[in-house]
């Protein structure tokens, strides 16, 4: 086997494990490489969990590999350590632009939101609330308005079953599956002011 | 995109106009570089700025923002008058041969049937002449003066190189060079691709800009072929998916329409959706509409959608008007909106006329934001000095800021510009108490359902009966939802040609939309996604790089809609007899028995070439439309209109302001500025280092582009006494902002109608939260008016003024 036949990452990974356990000799290298291999530190990413993902920014939709510490077992939290382009991906073939290359810092941004927050009318601050408080109250507000403003028929007496006094602006980077559930929930309420980034 | 990113390497000519792929889609642009390096392809860039795409182009031609139709009209005129079209393709695969009603016409900038008061057309004359059997009349010689071909010649004759130069400011010789290069692709063995993005959509005639180029591509025979197509680069990672799924006011999933209130019952709704073929023997695939509609209703309401209740037709809301975002914010300003949700969206920094957006949000009783990041919209009530000058105590809106997971913490599929659904997995858990959007939406639904069951209230039926078959009702899994999008058999599905044969057993996933039925035996949330998650598993997570013929289509990587087809209309890659136009770039061809090739044929697999079924099987004509009948609000052909705010009058008819069929609300019309007060053209764009307002939260990107700026030419800087790196104030009739001035050779004044027009370039990546310095966005200035067909706001061409100023007070 020559290096050319091994994918770059496959090689690095095998090499990393090789140094820890056996030697590069197992990969068909001679004694000279063996000596060198013993001097090389294990490849840091070899111990990471690899997860396939897609850059969430533009629709080139470059493949990325995310490296995290931890085995994702229950009761442990994984930590994302590195994100790089997926060399197998037919579109980007491992490359990333200045946006995709900095994805790690997006995930870890200081301004990532951590808790549901609530601002009372006229207040100058957000206060932390529980999910139950937030969802109970939003559901209540929705129902009160829907019950007050839902239109069953129009002025000609035709059935219209629409709700136009609450609007929903859907996202542009959520998954299709999220979009599907969002659609079901909002349309079943009769919501018409319902739009997404496609129009903008 | 009709084609795929990897397919661009097969182009001979790449035209980037209405986009800036090298900066906004860098890793996709590499396929242009590949085409240049390995195929000797040429790259043309037409753009108001000498962008980085332009810097690697073989030819660059400047253009004034908002004048693209005049330019493209000029190209069409050049192709037609120099006979540089792929005639066989045009004749057989487009409606050039069709005859149009004698009443249809165009004069002084307007088509027949215009009503100035309504700003709308009576479009009844924009149609074909029909024969006794209801088929369109045609003239195969294309010489009849009422043929689409002749009407097109006539319509575009005014777009001479002189007019193009006068309107667009594009020097005549440069324009002609572009025409010449494009015209070479009329050969069946030369292919051009069009790459465009929001530089074309964000105009009051955005859809017609794209039509203009689509017509060029049809005339050249470049649709359905490798290295060709109309390739919308698309801005956001799943904007294609959310459009496919119909998350728009007037849509149902899979490009079906939400009924209007005039469609009082299901029968009426279906009566205009017969989609009878308009020529003998054509497929008119939309004849299957009812199957897709019923399967959607079954997906929503399961057993409760029955033949007896017209598949719960009344449970869908009926439109009086379309509630697009512009209308919604207008209604908000009128005090007619109580509550609003922003899911992963930051309208305060993006929607036009920021002052109106702030006023609208302040009139809401409540606002809910769902986002992984701290957005300006969720803090619209917070005072940030010059950057958000509001009176907090006066704003009575109750705000919920809900923290959500981001891509790294979420699984599911997103759709790239090439229509590939690609699955991704979660690597880590969301921070602290952040939860998925699915958790929030399910939480709201379950609570509302409980409230309606307990208290009753307005029309609870569609809510309490919503199909909810998930193992964990509080947080349905991505896999369950993906299976639901695909669809399954609710009872055994039989073969229509052999009713004893079961095609899909009850409870099994369908393989393709061909298995969907209108008798209630199938459910499918989004018919075009049928095939994405079958009994064979999740097709969107496939990772096989197999690529026969080196097409760049990677047919076993992920899954493309529809039916894993990678190039739309691919039957058109072969001539009428089924032989590839270009053997070296063959795609789909007739083997003698069936259609075969590198892609899934967009055609009946065994339909013989001599049956003369057109390659555009979705259209009742069977062919592509150069003339769009009454399908677009602003005309069956593109026609040049100035932006609503323009430095010059429309040279065709100076009385027409903007697009005559675009909607504009009264207050917004009054808020338009005139060139005597606002002499310069503003335009907006992205930088390669940033993605909208997201990456200003990212340390690396904030370091790369830390501060808001505007770009102006050296000439304008000199005229106005503006220094490189100095502060300027830029203002429109709606708002004002401060920015650092980047004085550049990349923007040059253009000579338009005899006088110089200066362009002020305004990138859009700032705000008052995040790692960058605080800054503004173009939306502080832009007009509140959208495209006539889809209401995309006119962000790319508006009027501003500029002057040197002092630094803003630090907030
Ligand atoms: S890495 Fe850059 S080019 Fe690739 S998807 Fe992300 S933003 Fe687009």
Image (cartoon, coloured by chain):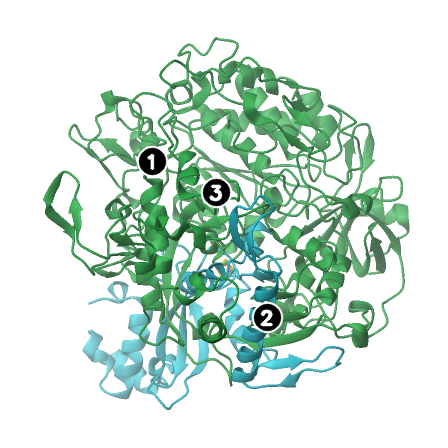
Chain colours: A cyan, B green
Q: Give x and y (percent) for residue A133.
A: 56, 83
Secondary element at tag 1: helix
B748 left or right, relative to B491? right
Secondary element at tag 3: loop
**Circle 3 residue:** B264
Tell me the chain of label 3.
B
Say if B513 sits above or below B156 in the image: below
B482 left or right, relative to B673? left
Tell me the chain of label 1.
B
Say if B35 sits above or below B127 in the image: below
The label number, if any, that marks residue B617 in the structure image: none
Q: Name the residue rendered at 51%, 42% in the picture.
A: B195
Q: Give x and y (percent) for residue A63.
A: 40, 63
Count residues near mark 3 (Cα–Cα under 10 Å), then give few for <14, some for 14-19, many for 20+.
some
Say if B606 sits above or below A87 in the image: above
- Residues at marks 1 and 3, CA–CA distance in whole angstroms: 21 Å
Q: Nearer the viewer, residue B110 or B712?
A: B110
**Circle 2 residue:** A144
The label number, if any, that marks residue B287 in the structure image: 1
Count residues near mark 2 (Cα–Cα under 10 Å), then give few for <14, some for 14-19, many for 20+.
few
Q: Name the residue rendered at 84%, 46% in the picture.
A: B716
Q: Quadrant of residue B360?
A: bottom right
Q: Name the residue rendered at 52%, 50% in the picture.
A: A160
Q: Which mark is in front, 1 or 3?
A: 3
B27 left or right, relative to A112? left
Q: Are marks 1 and 3 on the same chain?
A: yes
Q: Give x and y (percent) for residue B8.
A: 42, 43
Q: Give x and y (percent) for residue B52.
A: 61, 49
Q: Quadrant of residue A136?
A: bottom right
Q: Which mark is in front, 1 or 2?
A: 2
């Amino acid at each position: 086997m020559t290096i050319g036949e091994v994918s770059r990452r496959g090689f690095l990974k095998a090499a990393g494990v090789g140094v820890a356990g056996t030697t590069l000799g197992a990969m068909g290298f001679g004694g000279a490489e063996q000596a060198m291999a013993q001097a090389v530190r294990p490849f840091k990413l070899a111990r990471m969990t690899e997860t396939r993902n897609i850059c969430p920014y533009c629709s080139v939709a470059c493949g990325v590999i995310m490296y995290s510490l931890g085995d994702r077992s229950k009761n442990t939290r994984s930590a994302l350590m590195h994100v790089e382009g997926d060399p197998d991906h037919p579109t980007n073939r491992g490359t990333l632009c200045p946006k995709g290359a900095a994805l790690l810092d997006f995930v870890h941004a200081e301004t990532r939101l951590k808790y549901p927050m609530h601002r009372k009318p006229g207040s100058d601050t957000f206060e932390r609330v529980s999910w139950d408080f937030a969802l109970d109250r939003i559901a209540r507000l929705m129902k009160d308005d829907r019950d007050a403003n839902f239109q069953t028929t129009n002025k000609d007496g035709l059935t219209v079953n629409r709700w136009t006094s609450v609007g929903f602006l859907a996202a542009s980077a959520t998954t299709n599956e999220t979009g599907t559930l969002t659609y079901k929930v909002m349309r079943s309420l009769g919501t018409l002011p319902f739009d997404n980034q496609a129009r903008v | 995109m009709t084609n795929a990113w990897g397919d661009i390497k097969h182009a001979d000519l790449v035209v980037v106009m209405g986009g800036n792929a090298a900066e906004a889609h860098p890793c996709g642009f590499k396929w242009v570089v590949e085409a240049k390096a390995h195929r000797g392809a040429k790259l043309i860039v037409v753009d108001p700025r000498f962008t980085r795409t332009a810097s690697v182009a073989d030819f660059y031609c400047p253009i004034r923002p908002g004048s693209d139709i005049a330019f493209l009209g000029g190209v069409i005129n050049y192709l037609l008058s120099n006979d540089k079209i792929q005639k066989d393709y045009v004749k057989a695969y487009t409606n050039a041969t069709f005859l149009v009603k004698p009443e249809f016409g165009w004069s002084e900038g307007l088509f027949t049937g215009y009503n100035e008061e309504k700003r709308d057309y009576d479009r009844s004359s924009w149609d074909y002449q029909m024969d006794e059997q209801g088929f369109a009349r045609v003239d195969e010689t294309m010489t009849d003066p009422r043929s689409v071909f002749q009407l097109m010649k006539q319509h575009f004759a005014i777009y001479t190189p002189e007019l193009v130069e006068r309107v667009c400011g594009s020097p005549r010789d440069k324009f002609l060079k572009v025409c010449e290069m494009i015209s070479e692709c009329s050969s069946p063995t030369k292919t051009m691709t069009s790459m465009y993005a929001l530089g074309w959509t964000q105009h009051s005639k955005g859809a017609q800009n794209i039509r203009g180029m689509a017509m060029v591509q049809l005339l050249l025979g470049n649709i359905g072929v490798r290295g060709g197509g109309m390739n919308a680069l698309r801005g956001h990672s799943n904007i294609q998916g959310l459009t496919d799924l119909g998350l728009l006011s007037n849509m149902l999933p899979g490009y079906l329409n939400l009924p209007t209130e005039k469609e009082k019952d299901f029968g009426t709704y279906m009566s205009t959706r017969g989609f009878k073929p308009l020529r003998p023997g054509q497929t008119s695939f939309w004849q299957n509409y009812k199957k897709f509609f019923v399967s959607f209703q079954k997906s929503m309401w399961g057993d409760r959608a029955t033949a007896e209740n017209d598949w719960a037709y009344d449970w869908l809301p009926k439109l009086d008007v379309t509630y697009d975002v512009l209308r919604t914010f207008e209604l908000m300003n009128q005090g007619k909106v109580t509550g609003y949700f922003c899911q992963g969206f930051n309208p305060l920094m993006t929607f036009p006329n920021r002052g109106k957006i702030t006023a609208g949000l302040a009139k809401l009783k409540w606002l809910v934001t769902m986002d992984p990041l701290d957005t300006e919209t969720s803090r619209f009530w917070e005072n940030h000095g010059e950057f958000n000058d509001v009176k907090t105590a006066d704003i009575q809106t109750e705000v919920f800021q809900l923290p959500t997971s981001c891509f790294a913490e979420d699984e599911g599929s997103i759709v790239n510009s090439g229509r590939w659904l690609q699955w991704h997995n979660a690597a880590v858990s969301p921070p602290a108490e952040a939860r998925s959007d699915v958790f929030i939406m399910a939480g709201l639904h379950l609570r509302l359902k409980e409230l309606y069951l307990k208290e009753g209230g307005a029309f609870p039926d569609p809510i309490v009966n919503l199909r909810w078959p998930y193992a964990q009702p509080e947080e349905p899994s991505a896999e369950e939802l993906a299976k639901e999008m695909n669809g399954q058999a609710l009872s055994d599905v039989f073969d229509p040609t052999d009713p004893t044969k079961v095609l899909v057993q009850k409870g099994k996933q369908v393989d393709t939309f061909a298995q969907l039925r209108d008798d209630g035996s199938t459910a499918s949330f989004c018919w075009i996604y049928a095939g994405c998650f079958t009994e064979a598993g999740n097709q969107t997570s496939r990772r096989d790089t197999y690529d026969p013929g080196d097409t760049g289509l990677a047919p076993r990587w992920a899954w493309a809609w529809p039916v894993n087809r990678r190039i739309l209309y691919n039957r058109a890659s072969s001539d009428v007899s089924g032989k590839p136009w270009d053997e070296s770039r063959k795609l789909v061809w007739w083997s003698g028995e069936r259609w075969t090739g590198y892609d899934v044929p967009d055609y009946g697999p065994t339909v013989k070439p001599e049956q003369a079924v057109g390659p555009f099987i979705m259209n009742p004509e069977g062919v592509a439309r150069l003339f769009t009948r009454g399908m677009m609000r602003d005309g069956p052909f593109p026609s040049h209109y100035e932006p609503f705010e323009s430095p010059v009058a429309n040279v065709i008819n100076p009385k027409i302001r903007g697009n005559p069929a675009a909607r504009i609300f009264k207050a917004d019309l009054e808020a338009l500025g005139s060139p005597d007060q606002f002499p310069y053209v503003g335009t907006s764009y992205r930088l390669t280092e940033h993605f909208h307002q997201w990456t200003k939260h990212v340390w690396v990107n904030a370091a790369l582009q830390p501060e808001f700026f505007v770009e102006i030419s050296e000439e304008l800087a000199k005229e106005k006494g503006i220094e490189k790196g100095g502060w300027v104030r830029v203002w429109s009739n709606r708002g004002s902002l401060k920015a650092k001035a980047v004085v550049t050779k990349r923007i040059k004044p253009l000579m338009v109608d005899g006088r110089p027009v200066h362009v002020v370039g305004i990138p859009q990546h700032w705000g008052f939260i995040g790692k960058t310095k605080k800054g503004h966005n173009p939306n502080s200035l832009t007009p509140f008016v959208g495209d006539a067909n889809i209401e995309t706001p006119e962000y790319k061409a508006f009027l501003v003024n500029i002057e040197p100023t002092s630094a803003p007070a630090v907030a």
